[in-house]
Amino acid sequence: MRMRRLRLAVSSLGVSLAVAGCAVPYDDDGELLAGGRLASAPVKTHSAVPVVIDSDLAPDDLAAISYLVRHPEVRVVGVTVPTTGMVTCPAGIALLDDLFTAIEAKPVPVACGEEPRGAAGVPFPAWWGIGSLTDSGLERGVGDGSTRVSRRPAGRFLADAARRHPGLHVVALGPLTEVAALLRSDPDAYVRLAGVTTMAGIVEEPAQDSDLGVGEWNAAADPEAFASVVAGPVPVTVVPHDPVPPGRPAGMAVPVVGHLGFATDFESPAFWDLATAALFTLPVAARAETGTWRVDVRDDRGRLTRTGDGTVRVVTALDAARLDDAYRAVFEARD
């Protein structure tokens, strides 16, 4: 994903909220009001789908994790944190502990990655990771220390989860380093996955950093990993950068979550990962093109090109209004 320093003009913010037409916790100057608690999460259904979230813990990742942890049809069984993303362990553990406490959710196990990026990978700028930790919009130091760190590295955690939880899905919100490592090291466990949904790549948009050969940052951080998952034996849904609406979703206008990546000096200009999480729960909110896809791993890292018939689903359009309704249903739920 691409992050950049961005300060929204208050007047522009007020206009956008007025257009959205929703009642939100802002003061007269357009600032999101501090404090407040999220409403109680919806009750989990007996048929909730088991999910491992693979995340590099940027601000929009935190929003996506909050959504999936609270969603009644999703049972998050763990979070894996690759070494190739913006925030890594051990700092990521403390960040997640703060998040689970802030959203009043029972912590899930966290497994730390150990796999290096491939030879063609481009590291994220270091200050992006610093900004994700210090200026995400999440209040820091509020965690109660109950988040448990798995003794197993991320790859082994994924393998064990695939065997323990039939129908397990991976929702990948960062570089696919650990998911691809599972495919290499334990293909029998990998094929037990019901599917991988990933926010990565571009199709027709300009490269995000042509000087560095970065088509899209999540993919470019480890393009060989992205390519191997796209070509792998389990169903894959790719949400590229192209169709994700810019700006802050109206359905995020709630306490705690509404601060993430918003009204800070370090912002997510689009909530790629939240859209990906919502799409996982609401596939009808997207149009997609299926096929086989080639991933550029050298010159325009992460660019996807359709090469023929196949089963990989690449999202081409998102229904922002339906996604906003999905966010509201999860974040504004009442007892």
Image: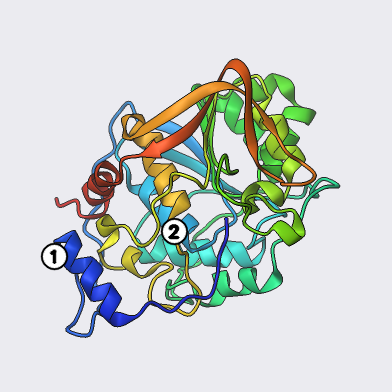
Q: Amino acid at mark 2?
A: Ala
Task: Work out whether 292 lies above or below 17.
Answer: above
Labelled disc at residue 23: 1
Is residue 156 in view? no
Percent position of residue 248, x then y: 35, 62
Task: Work out whether 200 lies above or below 227.
Answer: below
Q: Residue at x 28, y 49 (%)?
A: 327
Percent position of residue 285, x then y: 32, 35
Q: CA distance from mark 2 to mark 1?
A: 21 Å
Image position of 2 (left or right of 144): right
Query: What colour scheme was applied to this rendering of the protein?
Result: rainbow
The answer to which quarter of the image holds residue 229 is top right
Question: Mark 2 or mark 1: which is in front?
Answer: 2
Q: Residue at x 46, y 58 (%)?
A: 60
The total of numbered circles placed on residues is 2
Q: Residue at x 47, y 50 (%)?
A: 273
Asked if the residue under mark 1 is in contact with the one under mark 2, i.e. CB atoms within 8 Å, the reply is: no
Name the image quarter holding the N terminus.
bottom right
Image position of 324 (left or right of 175): left
Depth order, front residue of 147/33 = 33
Percent position of residue 289, x then y: 48, 25
Which residue in the structure is indicated by mark 2? 270
